[in-house]
Amino acid sequence: MIQLLKIIAVLALLFASTFIIANLTGWLSTEQVEIWFQSADQLSPSSVAMLVILLLFADLFIAVPTLTISILAGYFLGFPLGGASAIIGMILAGLSGYVLSYFNGDLLFKYLIKDSDRRADAVLTFQNYGFIMILMSRAVPIFPEVSACLAGITKMKFPRFLLAWLLSSVPYAIIASYAGSISSIDNPIPAIYTAILLSGTLWIGWFFFSWFQRSKPIIHNN
């Protein structure tokens, strides 16, 4: 587990640095994102949908406020178009992270963990916990991208990764965008409650998963 945590820490630091830079420059602040949405909304729904997809895809490279974007997608596009746009963006980000890491992650993997036995231990750990880590990843900012890259680096089977990513992303995007679609400037309560409920539910799920895994031994493959 220690070896896997080392990789997680490095990947999280890389993604966090992009988030810090983007916020310090004001380029991807919540206010700036709202301005972009308002500008795109003056053009056409397809322009807003493309903005949603591009922003959520860019989350793989520059950490963006995923929940805020999903809620704004529902607010400006309505439901289900807002949800569909958010789902497409999240899927593109996840697939890209997996594929890029699958074919190019070995260099980083071998640099961080030089011992082959320890690399094998990290792979085994992710094989045991990876599915649930991806499933619960949206409880923590940046961790969805980290988990997608980890899946590629450790050569997680693609169907298994895709299933976990869809189970993590699709309900999240649907709930957030629907809340945005029934919210307004005068009545932002649905969006606010949804943000709290989604984050709270995922955090509670992550807490119980962590508690359960403390007493569960890692299953070693023969």
Image (cartoon, helix red, strand yellow):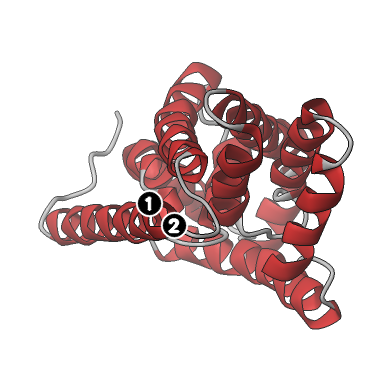
Image marks 2 and 1: residues in contact by CB distance under 8 Å: yes
Along the line of sight, the residue nearer the viewer: 121 or 137: 137
Along the line of sight, the residue nearer the viewer: 74 or 87: 74
Can you name the residue that lies furthest to the top here? Answer: 159
10 Å crowding of disc 2: few (<14), some (14-19), many (20+): few
Name the residue that disc number 1 marks: 190
Q: Quadrant of the N terminus?
A: bottom left
Q: Position of residue 174 (x, y in %)?
A: 45, 32
Q: Locate residue 220: give its quadrant.
A: top left
Q: Quadrant of the C terminus?
A: top left
Residue 70, label in figure: none
Q: Residue at x 58, y 58 (%)?
A: 115
Q: Is residue 200 above or below residue 221?
A: below
The residue under label 1 is which amino acid type?
Pro
Q: Secondary structure at mark 1?
A: helix
10 Å crowding of disc 1: few (<14), some (14-19), many (20+): some
Q: Visible in this render: residue 87?
A: yes
Q: Position of residue 122 (x, y in %)?
A: 46, 51
